[in-house]
Amino acid sequence: MAKEKRGEGGGFFPGLIVGGLVGAALGILWAPNRGEETRAQLMGKTEELRSNLEDVSSRARSGADEAASMARESASEVASRAKESAEGMMSRGRSRMQEAMEEGKRAANESAQEMEARLHEEREKAARSKNESI
């Protein structure tokens, strides 16, 4: 399908050139003027055709440059959005990691306090037991 689309647009420039040459040749064959006048007209038409071809070529280049510029801008915008998104995810990840570390520290402190309280209770029980046995 891509070949068909290229084939349709690819015939314009060759058609333009061939059409110009055929038109010039027919003009010479059916020209009612003398040779000098015909050559002058032919030179004028050749220059006109060259000018038109340069104009079409210039417009095509300009269009291609504009399309390339737009593609670069779009690619730059996509890259910028991707970078912002990645930075946001990294920031959220760091924040969640920090929260998890803080929660882990709190849980460890609570466990240490509970263990110290149990140890204290056990020491008191042991001390009472020892006092009762004396």
Image (cartoon, grey):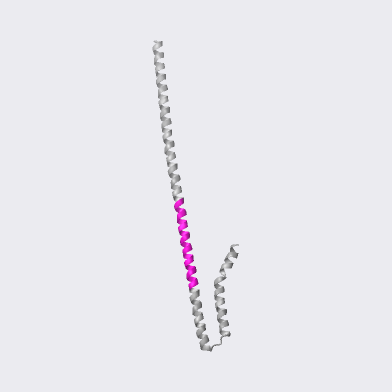
112 lies above or below 132: below
Range of magenta residues: 55-81
Task: Specify the quadrant that holds the N terminus.
Answer: bottom right
Q: Position of residue 97 (x, y in %)?
A: 44, 39
> Going by the picture, which residue comes out furthest to the top?
134
> Going by the picture, which residue comes out furthest to the bottom?
34
Q: Position of residue 128 (x, y in %)?
A: 40, 14
Residue in the image at 45% along x and 51% along y? 81
Q: Position of residue 74 (x, y in %)?
A: 47, 57
Residue in the image at 58% along x and 67% along y? 8
The part of the image, by quadrant, that contains residue 93 is: top left
Q: Position of residue 80 (x, y in %)?
A: 44, 53
68 lies above or below 106: below
Pick the front one: 80 or 130: 80
Residue in the image at 39% along x and 21% along y? 120
Query: Is 76 within the magenta?
Result: yes
Tally of numbered discs? 0
49 lies above or below 65: below
The part of the image, by quadrant, that contains residue 101 is: top left
Residue in the image at 49% along x and 65% along y? 64
Pick the front one: 112 or 31: 31
Q: Main secondary structure of the magenta part?
A: helix
Query: Is 61 within the magenta?
Result: yes
